[in-house]
Amino acid sequence: QSALTQPPSASGSPGQSVTISCTGTSSDVGGYNYVSWYQQHPGKAPKLMIYEVTKRPSGVPDRFSGSKSGNTASLTVSGLQAEDEADYYCTSYGGSSNLVFGGGTKVTVL
Amino acid sequence: QVQLVQSGSELRKPGASVKVSCKASGYTFTTYGMNWVRQAPGQGLEWMGWIDTNTGTPTHAQGFTGRFVFSLDTSLSTAYLQISSLKAEDTAVYYCARELLGGRSIDIWGQGTTVTVSS
């Protein structure tokens, strides 16, 4: 199963919004509502930010939101803050007990 | 609280083996499966597979068969990743991560274990 496609980088100024895309196929992103997003700061373990396309775990700010259209899922970070600068990864269920990750997007707060 | 604590960094020579442990606490170990994820230096996350902690049945991702073994000690609430015949390209941080939604996502991550393969 091929990795999901994410842009390598994205950026925005404090207070602005940034949207990251995650493109797969009908066998993963398009076929299931099991897209998750993770935030990873340098040297740290990933942290779950969004699951089941749109759901936020307890403690994740509502500035983070997810959506999906066809084979592409998106993560939007509104009201960018300095601490949002990190790498972001999407995953999708791909059937047959398999998961597939995106290549990651580095978000820079200008 | 729910947490996964992994064993410390390892340095091995090519051809050797390594076993990474992941101890779970704060929940019933056999209720949630355990994933393994690799992150090579400066690279992204790669899903290696997962093990059903109730049955012990492993599922390996493509590219992580043969040399990569997932195992459990449920009496210790601990999952293990063993890698044999180590190669330089196995140098990476290895994470254990608890499954969510019946294996369709991941919620809790261990802190990661750095494995360095060098002669």
Image: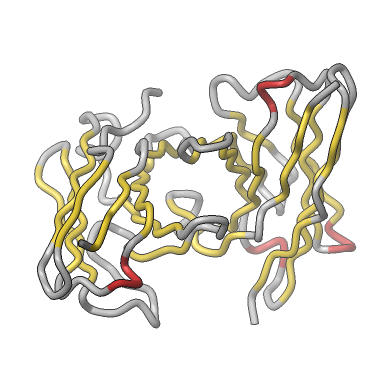
Question: Residue A76 location, x and y as percent?
Answer: 17, 61
Answer with left or right where residue A54 lies relative to residue A56. Answer: left
Front-lying residue, A81 or A64: A81
Quadrant of the image occupied by residue B101: bottom left
Compared to residue B14, the image places residue B8 above or below, namely below
- State which quarter of the image contains the C terminus of chain A: bottom left
Q: Residue furthest front?
A: A110
- State which quarter of the image contains the N terminus of chain A: top left
Front-lying residue, A80 or A2: A80
How has the structure been colored for display? Answer: secondary structure
Answer with left or right where residue B88 lies relative to residue B38. Answer: right
Q: Give the number of marks.
A: 0
Residue depicted at 78% across the width and 62% down the height: B23
Compared to residue A5, the image places residue A52 above or below, namely below
Compared to residue B63, the image places residue A76 above or below, namely below
Question: Residue A96 location, x and y as percent?
Answer: 46, 33
Residue depicted at 82% across the width and 54% down the height: B8
Quadrant of the image occupied by residue B69: top right
Question: Residue B24 location, x and y as percent?
Answer: 74, 66
Residue depicted at 25% across the width and 44% down the height: A9
Compared to residue A60, the image places residue B114 above or below, namely above
Residue depicted at 32% across the width and 48% down the height: A106
Question: Residue A53 location, x and y as percent?
Answer: 25, 57
